[in-house]
Image (tube, rainbow, N blue to C red):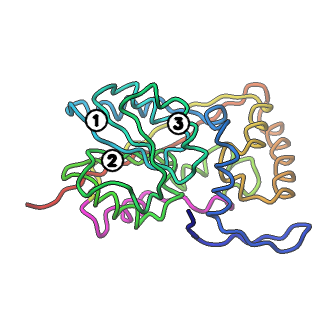
Amino acid sequence: MKKIYFNVIYKDDKGVIAHSVESLMSDHFSQVASIYSQIRTIDYELINYIAKKLAFKHTIVAADIGCGDGRYSIKLIEKLRNRLSLTCVDANYEMLQQISKISSNFQNLQTKQAFAEKLPFDDNSLDCIFSFNAIHHFKINEFAKECNRVLKNNGLLFIYTRLKEQNESNIWCKFFPDFSKKENRLFDNQSLTECISNQTSLNLKRSEFFEHKRSSDIQTLVSKAEKKHYSTFSLYTVSEFEKSLGKFKQNIYQNFSNPENIQWVDENTMFVFQKTVPN
């Protein structure tokens, strides 16, 4: 499965090398699939938020697009139980294999390998679509059209992401050199809303701002960066990453009095769109 977005060109000890972001991300997610659930954080508030929004529905046919290893998919199944029939969709085979290891425990869970821009569903077949921390990996205009196609009338699209301005406030942008420069795929509020709503019947119903208090020690943060817990780190060359990681350690020691108890706040936004087709 191949799809080219654009090229990243950089120079290292071997000379000038060009890679497509798609190929870098494919390699990244294949490499981290087996440890992804260990190095990423689940924001449990989202599960309760979604459950409240869907409290009125007795049966829910839905898909989690860009599901990764299914960490949010499983939490949704556990919360909504037999009310939810969920298909986990991802382009990465290794990620889907992580779900397959446990999917037999859930009769209402299945996986499908597909791109977000070509969803494997019939027209007007889904009540809900979820996407957690994945929208910046998609061609958003094509994804929006596909969501519009497969959602039933009045169906809901839940998109959870960190916006550009929210990315700027997290610990990595503040203290890990060039993190903001490397991560140029994120949206601002207006551009995301317009990309989803333009040329579709998907209208913004609500956006909800989330703040998550985090704490860690420097050893754990360094380990997560080395394991590429954010895909952004895979956009660095080896030499760039090593140099930036060294500077990150210095910045942490300089800005936190106790590097064994580092505290900060992560920010994210949940967008809820509804498909509304005029009679």
Q: Is residue 194 magenta?
A: yes
Residue 9: x percent and y percent?
Answer: 74, 72
SS of the residue under disc 3: helix
Q: Is residue 134 above or below residue 77?
A: below
Dot 3 or dot 2: first in sequence order is 3
Specify the farthest residue to the front.
104
Q: Which residue matches tag 2?
A: 272
Task: Look at the numbered discs 3 and 1 and tell me whether their residues touch, using CB distance below 8 Å.
Answer: no
Task: Look at the numbered discs 2 and 1 and tell me whether their residues touch, using CB distance below 8 Å.
Answer: yes
> What label does residue 150 carry, if any?
none
| C-alpha span from label 3 to label 2 | 26 Å
Q: Which residue matches tag 3?
A: 99
Dot 2 or dot 1: first in sequence order is 1
SS of the residue under disc 2: strand
Which quarter of the figure is the N terminus placed in? bottom right
Q: Is residue 112 above or below residue 45?
A: below
Magenta extent: 181-201
Q: Which residue matches tag 1?
A: 53
Which quarter of the figure is the C terminus placed in? bottom left
